[in-house]
Image (cartoon, helix red, strand yellow):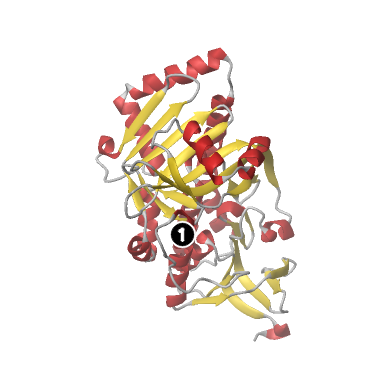
Amino acid sequence: MSEAGCESVDIAIVGGGIAGLAAAAALAGSGRSVAVLEARELPQTVPVSGDLPEDYDARVSALTPRSIDFLKQLGAWPAIEGARCCAYHHMTVWDAEGTGRIEFDAQEVSAESLGTIVENRLITAALAWKVQSLGGVRVLAPARLSDLSREDPEPVVLLEDGTRLRCQLLIAADGALSPTRELLGMRTREWEYGHRAIVTTVAFENRHQHTAWQRFLQTGPLALLPLSSVDDRLCSIVWSIEEHLADELLARSDAAFAKALGEASEYVLGNVTACAPRKAFPLRQRHAVDYVLPGVALVGDAAHTIHPLAGQGINLGLADVQVLAEELNTAFARGLGPGRMDVLSRYQRRRKGDNLAMMAAMDGFKRLFEQDAPPLRWLRNTGMRTVAGLPMVKRRIIRQAMGVG
C-alpha cells in the first residue's frame, strides 16, 4: 500500500470484455504494471458444449484477417481455433426490393477467407485465459467501479469494496454505456435508429457452404452468418428490424418465427429446422467527442458503437487496442509515461478518422436501403450490378472489409 491507503499501478483497465482483455494482453510485456478491473468473474475455461442451436452464444463477431492476426500476436487465437470458429469464403448481398445482387469471394483477392465467425464468449474466454496466464497483469474480478477522480495529477479509481487505485493511465473498456466515460463527463454524439437487432442461432435445411448472406429489406438488414458445426447447417442470425416488428417477432412461437425468417431470407438455405431462444437489443449509434484526456483513453464500445450491418464493432475495438498499444510501447521505448497527452493524442488521431468513416458508411448504407422511393431503388440495384461487374472495385471493397485495404 502506498500513502493515504491508495494502491498504485501504471495502467488500470476498466472492463474485462474483449477490448479490455486484449489491451491487458497487449501491454503485459511492456514492463509496466497492469491491472484489469471487471465487475464479473472472468471465465476460467473456453466454453464449448454441444452442437445444438441453444449451445451457441447468440452474439457473434465476423473477425477480419487483421483482427485474427492481432489475436495471434496476443497468443489468444490458438484457444479460439481449438474450440470452434467458422471461416467464410464467400459473401452474398442482395436487395429485397429489386434485382440488385453482388457476390464476394476470397479468391478474388487471393485470400484463404474473407473472415471468421466466432462466438463473442469464446473470444472473451480465450483472452481471459491468456491474460490470467501472463505475468505483469493483476486481475481484480469481481470489482465494481464506484467513483474516480482526476483532481490529482493521476487518475484515482474507487471500487465498491473501498479499494483505491492510483494509475498513470486509465483505459476505459467498459462498453457502450461506459460508467468510466460518464464519471469523467466525456461527451458523446448519439442517436437512436428506432430498430432492434434480433439475434439467435438457427439450423437450416441446407448447408451454409461457408458463405455469409445478407439481405437488405426495407424494414432492416438480415444477416445469416455461418457457424462451425458437425453438419454445417447452423447459422447465427442478426436481424435488424423496426422496433414494433421486433416485438412481434419476439412474441411469436418458434415455428412462426422460423417461417418468418425463411420468408425474409427467401429460403436461401431452405427451411429453418430448429431455433435457439431469441434475444434483442436496441440499436443506437454513439461516438465519443474525444477518445482521450490526460491520463485517460477510451477504447472499443466505450469510444464508439456502430450499426451491426457489417459486423465491424469488435474489429474496430481491436484496432483501437492495437494502435493504443503501439503508441504506448513506442512511448515507453523513449522513456515517456503512458498518461501523456501527446502520446494519447497520437492514438486518437490514428483511430478517430477510421472509426468515423466506417460509422458514416454503415449509416449511409442503412439509410439508402431502407428507402422505398423508386429512384433510390433504381440507384441501389444499378449500383450493385455495376460494382458486381467491376473486378478492381470489388477487390478494393473486399480488402477494406477484411481490414487490409
The residue lying toward the viewer, choosing from 334 and 135, is: 135
Image height check: is 92 above or below 272? above
Image coordinates of residue 284 in percent, x first then y, are 64, 42
Residue type at mark 1?
A: Asp
**Which quarter of the image is occupied by the C terminus?**
top left
Towards the viewer: 182 or 129:
129
Q: Quadrant of residue 79?
A: bottom left
Say which residue appears at 46% left-offset and 48% top-offset.
274
Q: In this view, does 196 lie above or below 376?
A: below
- Residue at left offset 49%, top offset 56%: 54
Most extreme residue toward the top is 375
Q: Tell how many labels.
A: 1
Label 1 crowd (10 A; few <14 / some 14-19 / many >=20): few
Relative placement, left or right, of 360 versus 80 is right
* Residue 259 in sight in this render: yes
- Rendered-image quadrant of the N terminus: bottom right
Quarter of image, res 49: bottom left
Image x and y of residue 384, in percent:
41, 23
Instruction: Please say if 263 is above or below 331.
Output: above
Comparing 312 with 194, the one in front is 194
Q: What residue do we see at 50% from left, 63% from top?
A: 23
Residue 200 lies, in percent from the top left, at: 52, 49
Horizontal and vertical percent position of residue 212:
39, 40
Which element is circle 1 on?
Answer: helix
Residue that badge 1 annotates: 55
Q: Is residue 286 visible?
A: no
Q: Reply above or below: 142 against 174.
A: below
Q: Is residue 399 left or right of residue 287?
A: left
Camera-side residue: 11 or 38? 38
